[in-house]
Image (cartoon, grey):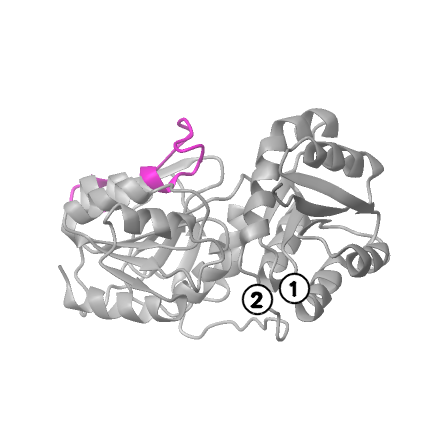
């Protein structure tokens, strides 16, 4: 007999609680051990039932959902999957929840919940499974955000003479990647080569995510738009629901954003971005594979290395989920495997050396 994943559902909607319970109980490897309609009730049920994973609604009555999550991660760290609304407020709160330690989130559809949750059922159970095996760290204190000094604002960034003008940095990430990206990008100086990023994220969240990163970094961070010239001192994040790649346009690189089919079940897909890096940028590309579930991008990262790129992969101990980095290592795509705390500095030193 294998041990089932024991899930506690916390949501103020009776319909959503019922749907989530049904979705979970239909899986052979998990069971819903309880439902709660607000955080205060959930707090007592957590003490009594000791769940493996909690699904938590973003907008909750009686106690602010973020306060509840922060207290949970300080006192009794437990894997949490957020159920988020597709609104600007919902996106802001969800990203804040990831900062506080939530493993991942599912976007609650605006449509009829019965139809919407039918579509999202596979996604929900996949994320619960990943959360059950994720590395959860105790929250020591609430993260503090500081606006960086020296951002170029609306002025086009100038590439530092320390870097080759043809250099691009390519980053792939999934579960746990929002916080990993923040730690990486915050270290890059003004004038650093352009960074092109695919983070698995649904529509409606990437613009807010880019804006939050932009407020924390010296380089400018934005959601990618089709046909933009890629400039140094900037980071471009694949829009949720679209594929992002790069192409040459004379002496410049340009973004390609298109509504093509999912690859490896993902749109955006790291595979799509990294394949374009291998094809277009070659030895002037630097690859970075961060925490995430699955194997999206692993084969294309090997193609990057075969084309002459230099690749970094996050190590197992610092990953929330080691799936994508492990797959890249097994493909022989990694030149260096390093903890998250060392990746940005190692990448910056390597970029200075050049191809």
Asked if residue 29 is positioned above or below residue 193 in the image, the reply reads above
Q: Is residue 104 left or right of residue 184?
A: right
Q: Nearer the viewer, residue 150 or 16?
A: 16
Q: Is residue 79 something one can see in this rendering?
A: yes
> Where does the image place residue 182, in percent across and percent down from the top left?
46, 62
> Where does the image place residue 191, in percent across and percent down from the top left?
29, 66
Q: Callout 1: helix, strand or loop?
A: loop
Asked if residue 26 is positioned above or below residue 47 in the image, the reply reads above
Q: Residues within 10 Å of mark 1 (few under 14, many from 20)?
A: some
Q: Is residue 44 left or right of residue 286?
A: right
Between discs 1 and 2, the one toward the N terminus: 1
Q: Quadrant of the N terminus?
A: top right
* Numbered label attached to residue 137: 2
> Where does the image place residue 288, in percent across and percent down from the top left?
32, 55
Q: Is residue 35 left or right of residue 239?
A: right
Residue drawn at (56%, 71%) of the image: 145
Q: Which residues are magenta?
A: 247-272
For this orientation, the residue located farthest to the front is: 1
Q: Nearer the viewer, residue 109 or 252?
A: 109
Q: Callout 2: helix, strand or loop?
A: loop
Q: Is 271 covered by the magenta stretch? A: yes
Residue labelled with disc 1: 77
> Where does the image place residue 23, in percent across and percent down from the top left?
69, 32
For this orientation, the residue located farthest to the top is: 115
Residue drawn at (34%, 67%) of the image: 344
Asked if residue 159 is positioned above or below residue 277 in the image, the reply reads below
| Count of numbered tags | 2
Q: Which corner quadrant of the image does residue 11 belong to?
A: top right
- Does the residue at mark 1 contact the one at mark 2 (Cβ under 8 Å)? yes
């Amino acid at each position: 007999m294998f041990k089932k994943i024991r899930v506690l559902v916390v949501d103020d909607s009776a319909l959503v609680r019922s749907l989530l319970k049904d979705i979970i109980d239909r899986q052979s490897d998990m069971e819903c051990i309880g439902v709660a309609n607000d955080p205060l009730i959930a707090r007592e049920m957590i003490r009594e039932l000791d769940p493996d994973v909690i699904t938590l609604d973003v907008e909750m009555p009686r106690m602010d959902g973020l306060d509840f999550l922060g207290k949970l991660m300080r006192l009794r760290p437990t894997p949490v999957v957020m159920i988020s609304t597709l609104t600007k407020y919902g996106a802001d709160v969800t990203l804040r929840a990831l900062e506080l330690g939530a493993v991942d989130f599912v976007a609650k559809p605006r449509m009829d919940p019965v139809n919407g949750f039918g579509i999202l059922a596979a996604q929900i159970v996949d994320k619960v499974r990943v959360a059950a095996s994720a590395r959860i760290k105790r929250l020591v204190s609430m993260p503090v955000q500081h606006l960086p000094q020296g951002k170029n604002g609306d002025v086009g960034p100038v590439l530092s003479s320390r870097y080759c003008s043809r250099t691009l940095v390519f980053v792939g990430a999934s579960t746990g990647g929002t916080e990993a990206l923040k730690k990486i990008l915050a270290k890059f100086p003004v004038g650093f080569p352009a960074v092109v990023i695919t983070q698995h994220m649904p529509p409606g969240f990437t613009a807010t995510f880019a804006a939050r990163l932009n407020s924390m970094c010296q380089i400018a961070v934005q959601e990618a738009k089709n046909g933009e010239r890629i400039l140094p001192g900037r980071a471009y994040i694949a829009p949720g629901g679209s594929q992002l790649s790069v192409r040459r346009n004379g002496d410049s690189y340009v973004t390609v954003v298109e509504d093509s089919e999912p690859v490896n079940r993902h749109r955006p897909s790291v595979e799509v971005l990294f394949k374009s890096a291998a094809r277009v940028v070659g030895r002037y590309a630097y690859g970075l594979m961060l925490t995430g579930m699955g194997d999206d991008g692993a084969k294309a990262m090997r193609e990057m290395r075969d084309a002459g790129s230099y690749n970094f992969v996050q190590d197992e101990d610092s990953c929330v989920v080691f799936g994508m980095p492990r797959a890249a290592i097994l493909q022989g795509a990694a030149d260096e495997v390093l903890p998250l705390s060392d990746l940005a500095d190692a990448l910056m030193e390597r970029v200075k050396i050049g191809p």
